[in-house]
């Protein structure tokens, strides 16, 4: 799994990079066919925004999350992506 991390109006510190990497290992435990992940962290006035596009075998999953704290926005983003990846995995096993 290759993670590309970008920031708009925010400097990507080492702690943010490690936090995002550790959180995305949770997704990899649920579904091991994740090819590429593109994460964009954005700051708009007082709102912290995290968005990610995950490339799976055969499809892509996209989610966004907003919060006043960047770490909470990342947590919400991971929860949304986790639900979508599990849903995609269940579709594959049903067919």
Image (spheres, rainbow, N blue to C red):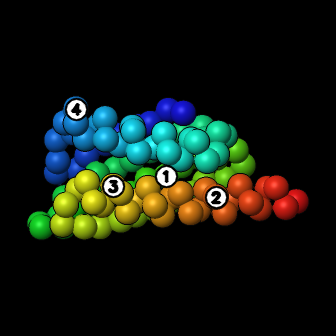
Residue ID for mark 3: 74
**Left or right: residue 23 compared with residue 46:** right
Residue in the picture at 56% in, 41% down? 28
From the viewer's perspective, is the residue at label 1 or at label 2 nearer? Answer: 2
Residue in the picture at 53% in, 47% down? 27
Q: Secondary structure at mark 3?
A: helix
Within 10 Å of disc 3 (Cα), the crowding (few <14, some 14-19, many 20+) is many
> Which quadrant: the N terminus?
top right
Residue ID for mark 1: 53
**Left or right: residue 65 compared with residue 11:** right
From the viewer's perspective, is the residue at label 4 or at label 2 nearer? Answer: 2
Q: Secondary structure at mark 1?
A: strand
Residue 39 visible in image: yes
Mark 2 or mark 3, earlier in chain: 3
Above or below 58: residue 50: below
Q: Position of residue 88 (x, y in %)?
A: 69, 59
Residue in the picture at 44% in, 55% down? 78
User: Which quadrant holds residue 68?
Assistant: bottom left
The answer for how far apart the CA atoms under marks 3 and 4 are is 15 Å
Residue with the most extreme left position: 45
């Amino acid at each position: 799994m290759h993670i590309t991390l970008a920031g708009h109006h925010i400097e990507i510190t080492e702690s943010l990079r490690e936090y995002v990497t550790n959180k995305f290992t949770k997704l990899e435990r649920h579904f091991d066919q994740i090819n590429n992940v593109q994460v964009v962290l954005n700051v708009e006035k007082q709102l912290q925004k995290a968005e990610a596009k995950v490339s799976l075998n055969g499809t892509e999953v996209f989610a966004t999350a907003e919060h006043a704290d960047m770490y909470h926005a990342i947590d919400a983003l991971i929860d949304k992506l986790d639900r979508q990846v599990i849903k995609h995995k269940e579709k594959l096993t049903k067919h």
